[in-house]
Every structure is written in structure tokens, then in C-alpha cells.
Image (cartoon, rainbow, N blue to C red):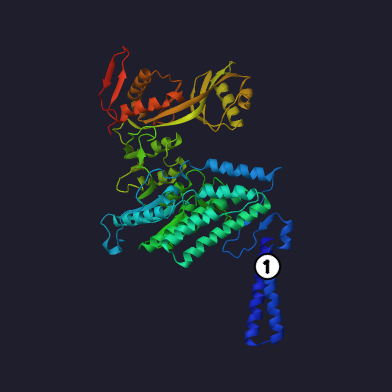
Amino acid sequence: PLISHSFEVACRITCSWIGLYKMVTHSVDMKFATVFLCLCLVGFGRGFGPSPRLSTSRAFVLPSSVRPSSVLFSTNEGEESDDPVSSSHSKISEYRDSMPPNRDKAEVSQMPTSVAATTYVPTNSVPSKIVRTVMKFGGSSLADASRIDHVAHLIKDQIALGNRPRAVICSAMGKTTNALLSAGDFALEGRVNVDALRTLHRACIDNFSFGPNVEREVLALLDECEDMLNGVRLLQELSPRSLDQLVSYGERCSVRIMAARLNQIGVPAQAFDSWEVGMITSSNFGDANVLPGSAEKIKEIFDRRVDPSVVAVVTGFIGHDEQGKITTLGRGGSDLSATTIGAACNLDEVQVWKDVDGILSCDPRVVPNAVSINKVSFEEASELAYFGAQVLHPIAMQPAMKKNVPVRVKNSYNPSHEGSVISATKDPDRLVTAITFKRGVQLLDIVSTRMLGAYGFLSTVFNEFERNRLSVDVLASSEVSISVTLDKKHKVGTEHAILKDLEACADVTVKNDRAILTLIADVGRSSEVLATAFRVFFNLGIQVEMLSQGASKVNISFIIKNKDLDDAILHLHSCFFEDKCVVSGLNDESIELEEELTGV
């Protein structure tokens, strides 16, 4: 129906131009030509309205689709529910929950709004050492006009220092993604309003006095977004595919504003939607994967079409599937966009700019004396991210790992700090790299009540976990018992199906309010690590309910009660990172371990 409707509109446009041409050249009777032209123009005006043929189809084309990108809403066969509005609200809620915790994080500290401007370094006078990079900036770094100005000048300064950003990856400004998700919720309830989004983006445009082209392009995207929300209001449904398109407007507006600001301060830049540089993904809307063939396509486009002297400002987090539909990359999306481009182009480094001095030894909200770690291996960084640290998501690191491209985490508020480098190697002299944790987990102790043997017992238990779609964080097992922790999103209550499914072969004890405390450490020296850790636990009277050290060669995890977590972290950090470890000996006499445990 959409193709037929588009063909009809094209025919009317053609007829209108024929009528105009004949009237100007006087090749036909003027009265006939005038009447013919008017009729065609009336038909042309109606052609952009909803086509009658579409009313019986499974698609809806937005009215007033005179903008560059038409929006197609579709309902997926086999996915209908009795209440599409409630279903769509649930999809938005799930989408919001799946976002990285710091994606729309507001800044809490007052930082300078700009850095000292420097002169853009021309090609014939560049520093002797050039580092080809991809630079990625998250939403908090681009929260408003002052932050965009700060980042633009930061990029300019980095160029002067010898960094050559082949691409700059941008997230949506500030809390734009959350605002778009909320707008989707309101549209399902019959209200469409994008005034707050217009205000945020127009404020940037007005603040920088951009030319009419930039303003027209950004506002056209917001108009298209509003049209899409009107479609949601009429359909009373928002499919995962449409939801991906909805949230994409944040990144698409952001890159156009950033590229315009860079050009204003003398850094040649051009905005690109990620699919324009080859970012092709699967069709798993909301959590798409970058397809293997994307790397070759990205390299070809950057080599042949993107001028090396121009900074390509590219949307993070989004892509196109093979049918040309907009997708989002899920957890770690913008970081994944950066590492994918960096690896595909064989660049020297991927730089991820955050609001801390690289990777810290612990969460500074728990340990104020947390220190920056200058070097971390990919494996260590993956474990840190998995257990809750705000580092790159493990999926985002995969392209860099495969091509051995270092990833540097830097502070956009303190650009002179060297940050932390994530690479294939780690510091061999360091005993413990970092301390991380997860609060609010559940501990399940599962003890066999039948003589199944280890193989039969384990297979039975994990088949039930799979059937109930429960994922395990930490595990310890013996022939007749298993202890596992479940993430807080998988709450097992007294009536949960897993308990009934396992009662035929095991007794299950559920313990709530537990925490995972993880030491990212050199497991080859685990005896040294465990000796110090258990001295601390003994001194504090903390009972370790489970210990896991296994497949990963870089982490040792302890399960303790939530209430004991903060004390344990503070004392362990003091021992491993602050060269001060005061514990009680077994004879209750206070002893001080003066050995240098960290090498930091």
C-alpha cells in the first residue's frame, strides 16, 4: 500500500509539471492547460493525506509526510495482545530499565563550562606523534549548550595535542532519551507534546547563533518525531520497531548540533547518522547486534568517502538493519558504536570520555579515597562491568579485543589526566586491581534430596533455571548441593515456579538482602589475596556465606549480608590500595600488615 500510494503521488507531481510546462510554452490551449494544472495541484495536495487504500491495511503512513524521512508504523503479526496500550507501556518500561544506569545521568558537580580555546592545528604543522582516535561522549557530557561548547573546545584542544579524531560518537543530549520514552507513554494516553525537547535543542541553536540550515534540519527531525507520536496516539500502540525509531531522534539531533559547533570554532566536521557510515545491525529491535559485515563496510566508507581532514560526528546507540529500519544497540550501545568504528578503521585508540578520572579502584560514593587505575586488561574491565562498575559494557569491548585496539577512559572535566587504558595486558605487579559489588541479590542454597549423582542433579537444576528464564551471577557447587546468586531483577518469592519445580529433587533455601563483593585480582596469587581478605572479615565479624573463584582468572567473589558490605569494602580498600591494613590476629592482638600489597 505504501508503494502504491507513493507511486500515485509521484504521478500527480509529474502531471503537475507537464501542465505547467505546456502552459508556459503555449503548446496547448491556455484555458485547458490552466484547468488541467489546477486539478493536478488539488490532487497533489490530497496525495499527501492518508490514502483510502491504507485504511484496510496493516500499516499507517503519517499525514503531512513532506519531511525527508517518512515514518511507517506497523503491527507485528502474532504479537497482538488484548490490551495494546498496556503492552506498549510495558515495552517502554522494559526499554527504560534496559538502558545503562549512567546513560541519562545528570551531573552533580559544578565544573567549568569550557576549556581554554586553542588554535586548530593545520596539516602542515601537526605534532610529531599523531594518535588516530575515535572519541565518544555520553549524554551527561552533552547535557546543554555549555556542555556542548566545552566538549567542542576539548576536541579542538586534543587535536592541537596530536589526537586526530577520525570520528566523534555522540549520545543524545542530557535526559533526551528518557524524555522521548515519556513522550511515547503520553502519546499512548492521547497526549502529544514535545515542547520540552524543542526548548532544549532550540536553546542550543539560539545560543550558538547557528545558520538557518542547521536550525531547519534539527527542527525538521523534531517535527518528524511529533508526527510519529501523533501516529502512536491514533494507533494506540508502540511496537519495538517504532520505539527504536522514537528514541533515535535524540542522537540524530545531537550530532547535528555538535558538528555545527565544531565548524563554528574552526574544526571541520560533518554530521552522520551511523548507517551512513556502514553501521548495519540485526533486526532485534531494542537490543540489536552489529553484523559481522559492518566492519568492512565501515572501513570502505571511511577510506573512500569521509575526508580524513574532517571530523565525522556520528550517532551512537543506533543503526540500521538490512531492511533499512532503525534499530538500537541496547546496553553499552554508544560505546559499542565507538569501538566498532575504531576497530574497523584500525585506529590507534578509542577514547571514551566520562566524568571520572578513568577506571577507579572502587565506587567513590562508597570509598572517597578511591584511586585511578592507569592500566587494566580487557578481561579485568569486563569483570568490573559485569559486577556493577561504571566501565564499558563487556559487549562494547568485543570489537576492540578482537583487533587489539586500546580503549582509554578519560575525564571530560579533567582532560589533562591520562585516564585508564584498557588493553590486552595487565599490570603484573599489582595484586588487586579494583573492588566492585552488587547489592540486593538473592542467595539460593539447593540441596539434593535424591541420589542423582552430580551429573543428574546439576542437569536437572539448570534445566529448571533455563525453563524459568533465570540467569545466575555467582555459583558454587558440590555433588549434592548448589549455591547460586540471582540478580535483583529476578526476585524469587515463596510462590515462584522455580521452587515448585525443584521440590521433587531438592530442598531450596532462599536468602534475601545479600551482596556480592568482588575483588578483581591476580588469581595466580589468590592465597595472598584470600589471607588478607579473611583477616579483614574476621576482624569485622563478617560471615562469608559463599566464595567463588573459578572460570574467570581475574575475580574472587564473596557473598555477604547487605548490612556488612560498606564496612568490608572500606577496610579491604585500605589494605589493598592505601598501604594501611590494621587487623586483629587470631590471638586478638592488633597487628599491622605493612607489606606493600598493591604495587600502586
Q: Residue at x 67, y 54 (%)?
A: 234
Residue 479: x and y, percent? 52, 19
Q: Residue at x 45, y 61 (%)?
A: 206
Nearest the viewer among 426 and 172 is 172
| Residue 487 to residue 179: above or below | above
Task: Work out which quarter of the rendered image holds the N terminus and state it.
Answer: bottom right
Q: Residue flagged by tag 1: what amino acid is it?
A: Gly
| Residue 200 to residue 417: above or below | below
Nearest the viewer among 514 and 382 is 514
Residue 471: x and y, percent? 54, 32
Residue 312: x and y, percent? 42, 58
Nearest the viewer among 546 and 413 is 413
Reading the image, the residue beneath label 1 is 47
Residue 282: x and y, percent? 55, 49
Instruction: Count neighbours of disc 1 (C-alpha within 10 A) and say few if under 14, some if 14 to 19, many if 20 or more.
Output: many
Whether residue 345 is visible here, answered yes or no, is no
| Residue 487 to residue 5: above or below | above
Question: Toward which corner of the image does residue 364 lie, by quadrant?
Answer: top left
Q: Give SS at disc 1.
A: helix
Q: How many marks do you count on the picture?
A: 1
Task: Work out which quarter of the rendered image holds the C terminus and state it.
Answer: top left
